[in-house]
Amino acid sequence: MSDFKVVGKVSDFEDNQGQAFEVAGRMVAVFRKGDEWYAIDDLCPHMGASLAEGHVEENSVTCPWHAWRFCIKDGTWEDNPSIKVDSFEVKVEDDHVMVKPIE
C-alpha cells in the first residue's frame, strides 16, 4: 500500500496546530509549520491521548494529558529518545495534503 491518502486541503490547516485523521486504519496527527508538513502517530504511547490536540512549540508537540513531548519531525519522545512513535511521509500536491500509510 504505497498510495498516499488525501487528508485535506492546505487551507484546512492552521500553522502550529495538529489535526487527527484515520489513515489505513491508524490515527495520524498531521502538523503544519509554515510550508513544512509532518505526521506522527496520533496516540500517545503513555495513556492514548490525542497528540493532535497537544500544544505545538518549535518542533515538539506536548501531550495534553501528561505533558510527554514528541518531535513532530520523527516521533521521538523528547525525554527519552529510545522511545518514539511512528512518523509518516507527507506531501502536498495541487493544494491537497496527503499522508503515506506505513506498510
Image (spheres, rainbow, N blue to C red):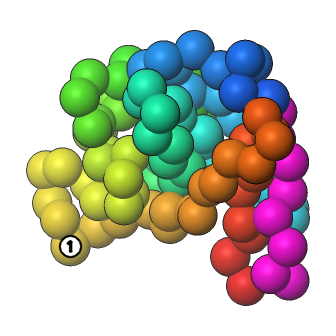
Question: Exactly how many numbered labels are in the figure?
Answer: 1
- Of all residues shown, which one is farthest toward the front? 94
Q: On the rendered structure, is 24 left or right of 88? A: right
**Is residue 74 inside the magenta stretch?**
no
Front-lying residue, 91 or 83? 91
Q: Position of residue 78 (x, y in %)?
A: 18, 49
What residue lies at 85% left-to-right and 73% top-to-bottom? 3
Q: Position of residue 48 (x, y in %)?
A: 56, 43
Front-lying residue, 10 or 45? 10
Q: On the rendered structure, is 68 left or right of 49? A: left
The secondary element bearing badge 1 is classed as: loop
Res 67 visible = no
Q: Position of residue 55 (x, y in %)?
A: 38, 19
Q: On the rendered structure, is 2 left or right of 92? A: right
Highlighted magenta segment, given as a residue range = 1-8
Q: Position of residue 61 (x, y in %)?
A: 35, 33
Please state, as top left, top right, bottom left or bottom right, where the C terminus lies in the image.
bottom right
What residue lies at 33% left-to-right and 29% top-to-bottom? 62
- Compared with 26, 1 (above or below) is below
Estimate how packed mark 1 is, as few (under 14), some (14 to 19) or many (20 or more) residues with alpha carbons within 10 Å: few
- Of all residues shown, which one is farthest toward the left? 79
Please state, as top left, top right, bottom left or bottom right, where the N terminus lies in the image.
bottom right
- Compared with 62, 27 (above or below) is below
Question: Where is residue 80, by image quadrant?
Answer: bottom left
Residue assigned mark 1: 82
What residue lies at 52% left-to-right and 53% top-to-bottom? 40
Front-lying residue, 85 or 102? 102
What residue lies at 13% left-to-right and 50% top-to-bottom? 79
